[in-house]
Amino acid sequence: MSMHTRRRTYLGAVTGVVLLVGGGFAVQATADSGAKASPAVQPAVQPAAKPAAPAATGSPKVVEAGTSGTGTGAGNAPRVIDPGHGVKK
């Protein structure tokens, strides 16, 4: 084969591949743009929800300065991680 014939063969093969791939994209785009199911119709305005009644809680606690309000002290406090020294209580 001459150089010119090889070039035509390669160009023909590349052109065929490009046309096949482009045709595949065109077919997929056409299939995706077809008729789609319409979304369900939303009902007219719905009435607003009624607010919840406030819970009866009795009288609030009075906490003196320097004491914990829960009475558990620091038992529920998160632990402090000191870099290089580990977890402290």
Image (tube, rainbow, N blue to C red):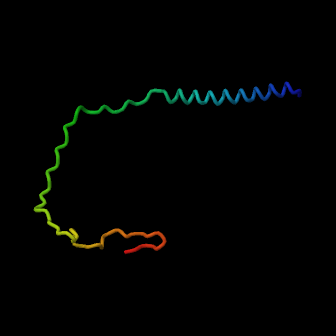
Nearest the eye: 43 or 47: 47
Q: Quadrant of the C terminus?
A: bottom left
- Residue at horizontal 29 percent and vertical 33 percent from the top: 42
Q: Is residue 37 left or right of residue 6?
A: left
- Residue at horizontal 45 percent and vertical 27 percent from the top: 35
- Residue at horizontal 62 percent and vertical 27 percent from the top: 23
Nearest the eye: 72 or 26: 72
Q: Position of residue 77 (x, y in %)?
A: 32, 69
Q: Position of residue 85 (x, y in %)?
A: 46, 74
- Residue at horizontal 64 percent and vertical 31 percent from the top: 21
Nearest the eye: 16 or 81: 81
Q: Quadrant of the N terminus?
A: top right
Q: Position of residue 52 (x, y in %)?
A: 16, 49
From this view, report whether residue 39 is shown above or below residue 64: above
Q: Is residue 4 left or right of residue 61?
A: right
User: Residue 12, located in which quarter of the rendered image?
Assistant: top right
Q: Is residue 5 left or right of residue 42?
A: right
Q: Position of residue 73 (x, y in %)?
A: 26, 73
